[in-house]
Amino acid sequence: MAKIPSIQHIILPLLLLLWELGFAEADPVLSRKDFPSDFIFGAGTSAYQVEGAVAEDGRSPSIWDVATHSGRMLYKGNGDVAADQYHKFKEDVKLMSDTGLDAYRMSISWSRLLPSGRGDINPKGLQYYNDLINELTDYGIEPHVTLYHLDHPQVLEEEYGGWLSPKIVEDFTEFADICFREFGDRVSYWTTINEPNMFAVGAYDNGVFAPSRCSKPFGAVNCKGGNSTVEPYIVVHHTLLAHASVVALYREKYLVKHHGWIGLNVFGVWTAPLTNSTADALAAQRSNDFYNGWILDPIVFGDYPEIMKKNIGSRLPSFTDFQSKQLNGSFDFIGLNHYLSFYAQDNSNDPQPEVLRDFNLDIFAKFTFVKDDTPSGQVVPGRNLPNRPWGLECLLDNIKQSYGNPPIFIQENGYGQIYNETLNDTARADYIAGYLNATLNAIRNGSNTRGYIMWSFLDVFEIITGYESRYGLYHVDFEDKNLKRTPKYSARWFTNFLKGHKKKKAIEKL
């Protein structure tokens, strides 16, 4: 499949015009009946953020256990207990059923299933995931399973540096093989790795994610080591190789038996030009290529975007012919996490080649969430981000135009509020309605989007803000010894939205 090299030059001005006109505003009477009958609606969490029980039943520490106890993070708190889904999964699955979810997106803790990173399976970890998956399927809820949600065993970090080493490709493939063998008869949707682009920048450029590596002047925290100018590119390279290896394994060994679908997740942003100038339009395109194309180009076309190879030079690893062929087409669907849309201002006339450059500086642009603000060289996600559904619509349309309109599952999209504002969360309901409407508009315009899985089902430990912000449909009282769950306004809104047609078996139609 050949890439369409000039399509963004054609569609970007049109998308910007639509952006300014404010298309995809929330439809107050939207219902699931407006969507295709086999469209999947769900909600998700991830293992470290929701399970708790970090020292129980043979689980070994992950990189997040070490990072959150290091004192280097931007917040207090950890996932030691979190929402304790490890002990409360039956209660939670019942709530999912009551809510009307078609699917639950979950991840498998590598360190719970394989405490040594490889070798012997932890039988209690295996039993937990079997019990959870069985409970979901008993209620008619489809498990959408992510193999890696940013939490590899600390023992592999100490042994060879985790994702900085190509050794992890073999170990991750072994871990995936076990998951496919043990759970594949009940799991039809597999995602290999969660948002490798944001993981690489957050963990190895500014250091706000585990394992908290960075170098001056780029680090946002007091990192224990690292090199922000090269490590993010090395990490993404190895995650892509691991993804391709796992997909090849699944297709060769399990596809005929289980007939499942496997894909890769990307943290998808939409960048629009700050002004109508050609320079800003090209800056926005560079940003979209760096954030989205960094992951999508290799799995669709077999190589990184040309602008990344040009701007990064020798700091960007290259693929062998075999690796390129294995990557090309290594997905059945693309998983999309979307929270951010922002503006870009061109900064290419001041390249300062003698200055150390990281991922953000390599784009040669400055960014702002609000047009009237002064753009800066860094994009810093957090809570209270602008509510911009049209950014998602632009992104879905861009993927349709530039990447051959692949099947897409929106796997994360959500709204964070501070903890004492979370029960009467009408703003979250408005947010969901707006983004659902944007998704529907994109579908009506030809996007091959197959599902919307919101973040998050419960309040959980958030990897950027800890417990300072809450994204859940269900409030969790973290001060209560029983961690009481209470539906928020948004949970009731979503349940009312989901009442209607029972979806058809979507796996048969993909």
Image: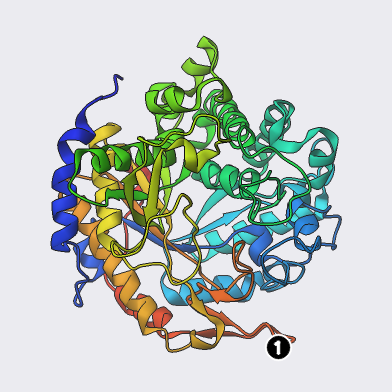
Side of 116 relative to 396 (left or right): right
Provide the residue designation for mark 1.
480
Q: Residue at x 46, y 44 (%)?
A: 266
Residue under the point 49% across and 70% down: 383
Tell me how the rendering is colored.
rainbow
Depth check, front residue: 247 or 180: 247
Residue 160 found in image quarter: top right
The total of numbered circles placed on residues is 1
Residue 395: x and y in percent read 30, 48
* Residue 121 x, y percent position in the rendering: 81, 43
> Quick one: 281 or 293, which is closer to the camera?
281
Q: Is residue 21 left or right of residue 504?
A: left
Q: Report x, y in % for residue 297.
A: 40, 29
Query: Residue visible at 79% across and 62% down?
Result: 54
Secondary structure of the residue carrying tag 1 is loop
Residue 330 seen: yes
- From where the camera sits, is residue 263 visible? no
- Horizontally, residue 140 falls left or right of residue 409, namely right
Q: Label 1: few (<14), some or many (≥20) within 10 Å?
A: few
User: Relative to residue 330, is residue 82 depicted above or below?
Assistant: below
Instruction: Give the residue type that dot 1 points to.
Output: Asp
Of residues 20 and 407, the one drawn nearer to the viewer in this rendering: 20
Judged left or right of residue 291, residue 169 is right
Figure quadrant of the C terminus: top left
Query: Could you tell me residue 136's position as x and y percent?
Result: 55, 62
Image quadrant in which the N terminus is located:
top left
Q: Is residue 416 above or below residue 178?
A: below
Q: Residue lying furthest top in this view?
A: 321
